[in-house]
Image (cartoon, rainbow, N blue to C red):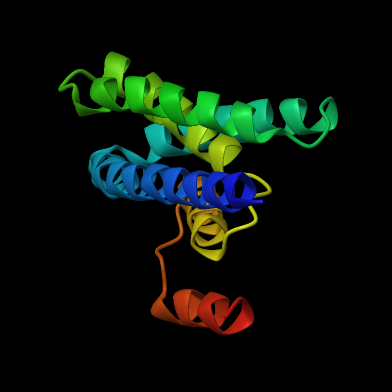
Amino acid sequence: MEFIKTHKWFLRTTDFAQYLALLRQFNAVSRVIVAMQPAQRRQIALIALEELARAESGQAVPARAEARKWTAEATQVFARTRSQHAFINGPAVQRWLICAYRATFNSPYGEVQSLHRTVLRALRHMQGDAPVRTSDVRSDQRRYA
């Protein structure tokens, strides 16, 4: 019985550490997104959403091990998002958003679900190029509190 409690604690701690890493990366990626041209942001969002829609239509609920795989890939792609060249950081931002979406999909933890919604919100704003309003953030916080 002690092993089960320790195992659950270990999984929760590991998931929280991965959440913190993804959150730190998201803050840096969002700064890169803001610096992009509107047409480039829109193109990245459309391609990412298309790929996510294709992946969601043909797959069952992802396992915990698969979420770890997506987190590891997001960490690898994150280094390319800091490039000064648009032809490198554009696809890297797109891939990072996809990896972050997949890593946070169907998580049982509230903070990870919040990050998932934040990634979706970033994709939505990139696609429509609408500015983020503080009322949007507050309504999401009330709805999911």
The image shows residue 62, relative to residue 118, as above or below, that is: above
Q: Is residue 115 visible?
A: yes
Residue under the image location 52 percent in, 37 percent down: 45
Residue under the image location 46 percent in, 60 percent down: 130
Residue under the image location 65 percent in, 26 percent down: 51
> Farthest residue in the front direction?
1
Residue 84, image x and y in percent?
15, 22
Residue 136, image x and y in percent?
50, 75
The image shows residue 20, relative to residue 142, as above or below, that is: above
The image shows residue 140, relative to residue 41, as above or below, that is: below
Q: Nearer the viewer, residue 18 or 33?
A: 18
Residue 119, image x and y in percent?
49, 49
The image shows a total of numbered marks equal to 0
Residue under the image location 41 percent in, 28 percent down: 74
Q: Can residue 43 be seen in this view?
A: no
Q: Is residue 84 left or right of residue 16?
A: left
Q: Quadrant of the C terminus?
A: bottom right
Residue 13, image x and y in percent?
43, 50
